[in-house]
Amino acid sequence: MPLVLLALQLQLPGWVYLLALLLTFALSRNALTEQVPLYLSSQESIAALAGFLSPGARVLDLGSGDGRVVLQLAALRPDVSVCGIENALLPWLWSRWRYWRAGCPVNARLQFGSFWQLDWQRFDVVHAFLSPVPMSRVWQRFRQDCHPEAILISNTFMIQGMVPQQRLPLSGPLQTELLIWRHPHGTC
């Protein structure tokens, strides 16, 4: 409210408000459309994820935001391939800049688009740090589209009615654990 009052006192032209709206949408589109705000994974969670992955794993990072999970996993684990997908424009552009600054690692990919439209079957591990809202839908998609040996890892957010097979504790106040589910038709 104080910012609104300040803006009214400054008598800014109308296009400034439109620009602010467009920037807000470009930054946090998913908070409005999917109820998924921009969450940034901690160093600890990325390190725990890197330590958990099997050699040669193909990892999909749902809603990759600024690309930190993709780029840090690629650096920590050159033996794995990591693909991140983000549909909010500004975080994706920032991730592309970070990718370029990191020397364009060959085992990392950053895509713009909706992860709901992506083929998940080619991945061994699906990583999500989204919100509680889409987790049931993520589980359904994982069950339907991923191969039987696939693993779903959620940073902190549970899937309603599903007990994880494994938990990797984290010490952060907001990121408390990595929750791990194996595909229900798998042999693991």
Image: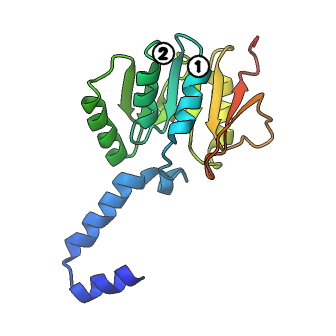
Q: Residues within 10 Å of mark 1 (few under 14, many from 20)?
A: some
Q: Which residue is mark 1?
A: 53
Q: Relative to 34, is 23 above or below?
A: below
Q: Nearer the viewer, residue 165 or 149?
A: 165
Determine the secondary structure under disc 2: loop
The reply, left or right, for residue 158 in relation to residue 82 is right
Quadrant of the rendered image containing residue 25? bottom left
Q: Relative to 31, is 110 above or below?
A: above
Quarter containing the N terminus: bottom left
The reply, left or right, for residue 144 in relation to residue 105 is right
Q: Which amino acid type corresponds to the residue marked 1 in the rendered image? A: Leu
Q: Residue at x 41, y 41 (%)?
A: 87
Q: Nearer the viewer, residue 162 or 41?
A: 41
Q: What colouring style does the render use?
A: rainbow
Q: Which amino acid type corresponds to the residue marked 2 in the rendered image? A: Val
* Residue at far bottom of view: 9
Q: Residues within 10 Å of mark 2 (few under 14, many from 20)?
A: some
> Percent position (x, y) of residue 116?
52, 34
> Percent position (x, y) of residue 111?
37, 30
Determine the secondary structure under disc 1: loop
Q: Residue at x 64, y 18 (%)?
A: 150
Quadrant of the rendered image containing residue 154? top right
Q: Nearer the viewer, residue 63 or 55?
A: 55
* Label pair 1/2, CB-CB below 8 angstroms: yes
Tell me which numbered mark, 1 or 2, is placed earlier along the sequence: 1
Q: Residue at x 72, y 40 (%)?
A: 159
Q: Which residue is mark 2?
A: 80
Quarter containing the C terminus: top right
> Percent position (x, y) of residue 113?
40, 36
